[in-house]
Image (tube, helix red, strand yellow):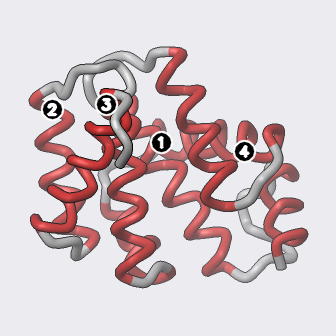
Amino acid sequence: MLDRIRAWVTSGSSDGAGLGSDASAMYLAAAGLLAEAAQEDGSVSEDEAKLIRSLLAERFSLSAPAAAALAERGEAAQANATGLFRFSRASVGTMDEGQREQLVEMMWDVIYADGVVHEYEANLMRRICGLLHVSDRASGEARKRAERRRAGSPG
């Protein structure tokens, strides 16, 4: 299954040919939401872009080139999206509660990558947590872990 997912990510196919729609939707939704978190403050730093690739590689066990391709596809999907619903619907439909909480933590990691939480980023997280059915408590805990990692503390 992982080989099929990696093939889909690197192929650039938008229809997920050869891959179940749930897995392709989950990967693209995660990449799109991470891209949204990165650009929410008006700019995407190189640190944020690197972190997104690293998070995707680690979370989905992808090679660096496959993670970069997925990140690129996520950016394109995010740029063409008219809102968060597409990504949140795909996430709720393909991820269990724990996976959605991990996605929220990944988004917090991206937001903290530049060292500042902009008011638009905090607003995005409030909205997306509601759409993903992630509790305020779980989001707060994820935020604290991301903040500790940013500060260099174990977390």
| SS assignment at label 3 | helix
Residue 19 falls in which quadrant of the image? bottom right
Q: Do the residues labelled 2 and 4 touch (CB within 8 Å)?
A: no
Considering the image in quadrants, where does the N terminus appear? Answer: bottom right
Give me the disc on residue 112: 3
Callout 4 crowding tier (Cα within 10 Å): few <14, some 14–19, many ≥20:
many
The residue to which callout 1 is attached is 80
Q: Which of marks 2 and 4 is in front?
A: 4
Q: The disc labelled 4 sits on which kind of residue?
A: Ala
Quarter of the figure with residue 4: bottom right
Q: Is mark 1 on a helix, strand or loop?
A: helix
**Crowding at mark 1 (Cα within 10 Å: few <14, some 14-19, many 20+):** few
Question: Residue 149 at x, y = what percent?
Answer: 37, 37
Asked if labels 2 and 1 touch by Cβ distance under 8 angstroms, the answer is: no
Is residue 52 left or right of 110 when viewed as pictured? right
Q: How far apart are marks 4 and 3 (CA)?
A: 20 Å
Question: Residue 133 at x, y = what percent?
Answer: 22, 76
